[in-house]
Amino acid sequence: MAVDIQQIRIGSVRVGVVGLAEECARLAGEAGNLSDSEMRDLLLARMAGRNYIPAGMQAEYAAAFWWEYRKYRGEAVPDEGGSGLVIEVLGPGCPRCEQLLEEVRYLLVREGIGAGVEHVTDLQAIAAFGPLATPALVIDGRVKSTGRIPPPGQILKWLRVTDD
């Protein structure tokens, strides 16, 4: 039996959760009888029964689950990450991966570019992108570089023009 695992964004971190699509479908069938507040609380309770939610993080998880539910229903929802880029450095945590991560962060701060930066170390998540080597640099879901640390000028070009 396949397990339904979906990654969602909690703040600036991506987290894998189990059963979100199933619970969204289940909740959509009950939507006529409940207020938005009741549906949001019910979704959180059901998801908490299937997933670990750290103490003090219930509000953040509830907001993320509700955002995903509204998206499931086809509602117009604001972009979850704001208008900034989503940058991922893929690699197991080796010194070269850390160097690329720090270079990207440095360039973002220096240039005043808004972006969410994540270091993806999970091998299955890395494999999903299909890089042949690490470190790999992914900008807005597109692999830009694998197996090397690109020159800063090239990284800046990718950050400024993400559709090349």
Image (tube, helix red, strand yellow):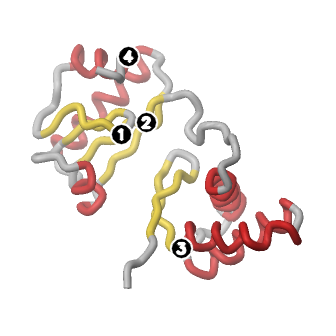
The reply to whether discs 2 and 1 touch (Cβ–Cβ < 8 Å) is yes
Mark 3 and mark 2: Cα distance apart in space: 24 Å
* Residue 9, percent from left and from top: 53, 51
Give the residue type that dot 1 points to.
Answer: Gly
Mark 4 and mark 1: Cα distance apart in space: 15 Å
The reply to whether discs 4 and 1 touch (Cβ–Cβ < 8 Å) is no
| Residue to which mark 3 is pinned | 19
Q: Earlier in the sequence, mark 4 or mark 1?
A: 1
In the visual, does 26 lie left or right of 20?
Answer: right
| Residue to which mark 1 is pinned | 141
**Label 1 neighbourhood size at 10 Å, few (<14), some (14-19), many (20+)?**
few
Which mark's residue is nearer the viewer, 3 or 4?
3
* Residue 58, percent from left and from top: 69, 64
Which is more toward the observer, 146 or 142? Answer: 142
Q: Earlier in the sequence, mark 1 or mark 3?
A: 3
If the image is split into quadrants, where does the C terminus sit? top left
Report helix, strand or loop for mark 3.
loop
Q: Is residue 116 above or below residue 162?
A: below
